[in-house]
Image (cartoon, helix red, strand yellow):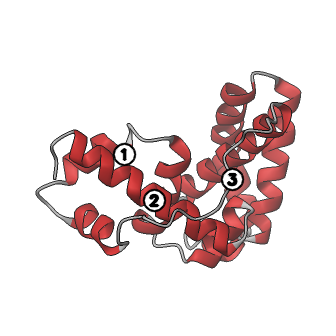
Amino acid sequence: MDKAEMIWHTYRRLMYAIALSSLGNEQDAEDAVSDAMERILRNLDCFDEVPSPRARNLCAVIVRNLCRDRIRRKNASPFAETEAEEEDAPPAPSAENVWLSAETADGVRRCLCMIPEAYADILRLRMANDCTMREIAGILGISEQNARTRLSRARAALLNKLREEGVL
């Protein structure tokens, strides 16, 4: 069995459950899983071992983001946030330092659950799964610049939450 088949057999139920809970419709969930598999096939080199926690996370993130995109397109608003990078974002390395700190690991995990899911996903891809910006862009179906912007916002959101919760 090749890697793509192994991913399908191992994670199709997980991806379908995520899509169904997000979209609430079996047809849309099936379409989202199909789209997720297409994206997975285009980024197959991101999957080292199957099954693995990294492969599971990647599948979950891909299908969640595709569902978010479908919902966003369905509910498009002229006032939607643009993807322009914020000028006063905090320096990037501090988020990684906090992530790796043994003293704050529990606090980081707790705060990661409190920030928007899209931000938590990109932080997991970058820091926990060690994906490159090119890989993240491919997984999320966005440009590398957009991925950098989202990562910067995610870092800022995590740091703010860490400060609010007294972890820092």
Q: Position of residue 34 (x, y in %)?
A: 84, 48
Sequence order check: which comes first, mark 1 or mark 3?
Answer: 3
Q: Amino acid at mark 2?
A: Leu
Q: Nearer the viewer, mark 1 or mark 3?
A: 3
Q: Relative to 153, does residue 43 appear above or below in the rendering?
A: below
Q: Residues within 10 Å of mark 2 (few under 14, many from 20)?
A: many
Name the residue: 16% across, 47% down.
Answer: 167
Q: Residue furthest left?
A: 103
Q: Amino acid at mark 3?
A: Thr
Where residue 136 sits, quadrant-wise, is bottom right
Which residue matches tag 1? 112
Name the residue: 28% across, 69% down.
Answer: 94
Sequence order check: which comes first, mark 1 or mark 2?
Answer: 1
Task: For the residues labelled 1 and 2, say whether their Cβ atoms are less than 8 Å apart.
Answer: yes
Which residue matches tag 2? 123
Q: Residue furthest top?
A: 24
CA gap, disc 1 and disc 2: 9 Å
Q: Position of residue 82 (x, y in %)?
A: 69, 53
- Could you tell whether 50 is left or right of 41 in the image? left
CA gap, disc 2 and disc 3: 20 Å
Q: Residues within 10 Å of mark 1 (few under 14, many from 20)?
A: many
Which residue matches tag 3? 82
Q: Amino acid at mark 1?
A: Leu
Q: Residues within 10 Å of mark 3 (few under 14, many from 20)?
A: few
Is residue 137 or residue 152 the one in the foreground? 152
Sequence order check: which comes first, mark 2 or mark 3?
Answer: 3
